[in-house]
Amino acid sequence: MRLFLPSAIFFFATQLLATASVAQSDRDTLFQVSTIDALLAGVYQPLATLDEVLTHGDFGLGTFAGLDGELILVAGDIYQAAADGTVRKMPGTAATPFISLTWFDADEQLQPPPGLDYAAFKTWLEAELPSPNLTYAVRVDGQFASIHYRSVPAQEPPYRPLKEVAKEQTYFKREKIAGTLIGFWCPSYVKGLNVPGFHLHFLSDDRASAGHLLDFSLTKGKVTLDPTTGWTLELPMDKAFLRANLGTDRAEALHAVEQGKP
Amino acid sequence: MRLFLPSAIFFFATQLLATASVAQSDRDTLFQVSTIDALLAGVYQPLATLDEVLTHGDFGLGTFAGLDGELILVAGDIYQAAADGTVRKMPGTAATPFISLTWFDADEQLQPPPGLDYAAFKTWLEAELPSPNLTYAVRVDGQFASIHYRSVPAQEPPYRPLKEVAKEQTYFKREKIAGTLIGFWCPSYVKGLNVPGFHLHFLSDDRASAGHLLDFSLTKGKVTLDPTTGWTLELPMDKAFLRANLGTDRAEALHAVEQGKP
């Protein structure tokens, strides 16, 4: 079991219960289309448009139909980080095969120690989480001495598994850059459905650099957490999803894809 | 990958898409409070009242606070199958630590071959499912040559894990009885959250016999399926849940608890 602070947990629980309402519980729900294992299996078909899912949140990450780059959703704006390094705002008519999102509320702010790399950041923040059994939307606004990220190239059917495609991903490195990390920390029990632990995408303040986070050196930053107590999964009625092989353990493939470095 | 019929899947998908609406998508959602692994870990605290959850469905199963018997929800009526063999209707003020429910729509009816036991029934029905990647509410109205079921005794804190408690469960056998099986078939990827495969509770037509299904010999019956395309998990802000050890694989404990026989 992960560490957490008993005193923090009671304060946190009391706060949430005190402000609970139907509207609040909707805001505190993580909504996702499809599953991470379907994406790993190569289900890159357009399963929902952004307009359809933006009724469930303004903050999240995912990818686009055909695996055409990394998707970043922040303050309701949709960004595409393409494999050629370009970043552009996308319309709500764009479609996605996989997205996770929530309404972001800045429930808790934390100050990370200076100079952390991603591994040290993970260890530090996991020890700060009130409970390892909830999902947290995580936002980091920071100055990065360096940052590594990647994007995936658009695919044509018949689609190959993500682990194969990831071999062709493009790696990027930036130095002395200001930007935001957007994503989630999920409990281990979401395995197969979403990414256990951290899953973050990067978007620079100048909106010129973006992608799936691989590593960083954080000069200074601010972490904002939004715990979610509900979780809604929408299973697409698409033949690609209905026929996907979701019966095998893809944990190894997920690890290779999420953390793969050049 | 499990078997399914390609022609059935398209018919099924077309039907569902044609009737899709917001209200319909709400009806087609499986709603659950807490997770099966939290129940296995001994989180038997009252996490929601039935009145709170019955806004999400009229058909389902679970247990009561303190693990006080098996819970059966059918046509909006709540039944408690206690470990002493009594069955009674329960009020909406009763509380639950774990429940799964949906609005039951009779989307598909199937006629099982005569004389099946539970193992043969599972093999037969799994081959009939349109896709192994959805969750199905399953209802079986039948005449049983024999049926085995069990219930669990109410517990006092500090709670022991379910596998320990299940050693003290009570077994029942009835012969030549008419009744209904109520429950779900879930895909393998719900592991940790709910029960992969079949999970059914029994309620006799005379409402005098009920419990968690272990085995049967089905003389004749009618199977009704309701596929669900959404899945909503409500994570309780209760210290017992927030502190539970949900990081270990409880598949073996689940198997022992679900299928345990005298």
Image (cartoon, coloured by chain):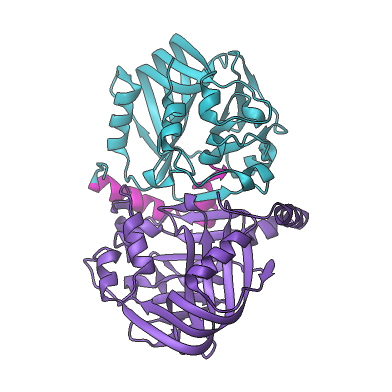
Chain colours: A cyan, B purple
Image quadrant assignment for residue B12: bottom right
For the magenta stretch, what is the residue range? A6-35
Residue at 21% x, 66% y is B158
User: Does B147 sit above or below residue A71?
Assistant: below
Please indicate, yes or no, whether residue A8 appears anywhere in the rendered image: yes
The front one of A13 and B33 is: B33
The front one of B112 and B77 is: B112
Spot the residue most to the right.
Answer: B18
User: B179 left or right of A95?
Assistant: left
User: Does A179 sit above or below residue A191?
Assistant: above
User: A242 left or right of A23?
Assistant: right
Please indicate, yes or no, whether residue B106 appears anywhere in the rendered image: no
**What is the number of callouts on the image?**
0
Q: Is residue A20 magenta?
A: yes
User: A156 left or right of A112?
Assistant: right
Residue at 60% x, 13% y is A84
